[in-house]
Amino acid sequence: MSKIVDEVMAANAEYASNFGDKGKLPMPPGRHFAILTCMDARLDPAKYAGLAEGDAHVIRNAGGRASDDAIRSLVISYKLLGTREWFVIHHTDCGMETFTSEIMGDLLESSLKTANIDTSGWHDSGEGPGTSDGKFIQWLTIPDQAKSVTADVKRIRNCTMVPPEIPIYGYIYDCRTGKLTEVEEASVAGRAGK
């Protein structure tokens, strides 16, 4: 096993030894809301949103984007598990701001190895084989955080499976300060009853 596997298993053993009554938590989130946010390791939704286990659904992907799968999860969160409010939270200094779909497609076509970035942009660190499959995916990159939050809230709001009574809020988390800042245009677009 790797060092990481050993560390994870040791941490899990410690966690499980103090699990207590958490096994009795109900499946629906106790505070009846969901957060769609980025997978960035610097973001801890439990801390920045004051969550305890069982409080809320947290859906994470690259950029916190309203992909089909993220919307699928939000609809399940509402329809089957009773969430009544949703937050879309992007963040400053996001890796999704550093490339375009074209760049990602080119990198994957060149090699499947991890790429590197420097002041001149992204570069492949290995040689092929690669794949052209990356050219056929919308990578949902982020050229502008506020516009992306707004676009995601609008995409969710316009989904025919999303009931109009669910308010959808748009925020940007600041990685330097830990503060959430509302994207007013997004929250207006996500108002309930629209």
Image (cartoon, helix red, strand yellow):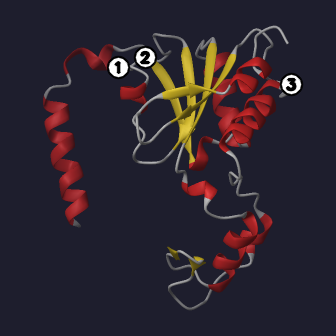
Quadrant for the C terminus, please: top right
Q: What is the secondary structure assignment of the residue under circle 3?
A: loop
Q: Are marks 1 and 2 in contact (CB under 8 Å)?
A: yes
- The residue under the point 19% across, 18% down is 20
Q: Give the residue drawn at x 55%, y 56%.
A: 95
Can you say whether 41 is above or below 132 in the image? above
Q: Position of residue 155 (x, y in %)?
A: 80, 33
Task: Say which label, 1 or 3, has the lower sequence index.
Answer: 1
Nearer the observer, 79 or 40: 40
Viewport quadrant of the N terminus: bottom left
- What residue does disc 1 label? 52
- Label 1, secondary structure: give it: loop
The residue indicated by pointer 2 is: 55
Label 2 neighbourhood size at 10 Å, few (<14), some (14-19), many (20+)? Answer: some
> In the rendered structure, which disc, 3 or 2, sits on the residue that comes first in sequence?
2
| Comparing labels 1 and 3, the label whose residue is closer to the camera | 1
Q: What whole-number distance in Å separates the C-alpha atoms at marks 1 and 2? A: 6 Å
Task: Decide which of 74, 40 is in the foreground and name it.
Answer: 40
**Mark 3 residue crowding within 10 angstroms, few (<14) / some (14–19) / many (20+):** few
Q: How far is the residue under mark 1 from the one under mark 3? A: 31 Å
The residue beneath circle 3 is 160
Q: Amino acid at mark 1?
A: Ala
Res. 153 image quadrant: top right
Image coordinates for residue 80, horizontal then vertical, percent: 63, 17
Give the residue type at disc 2: Asp
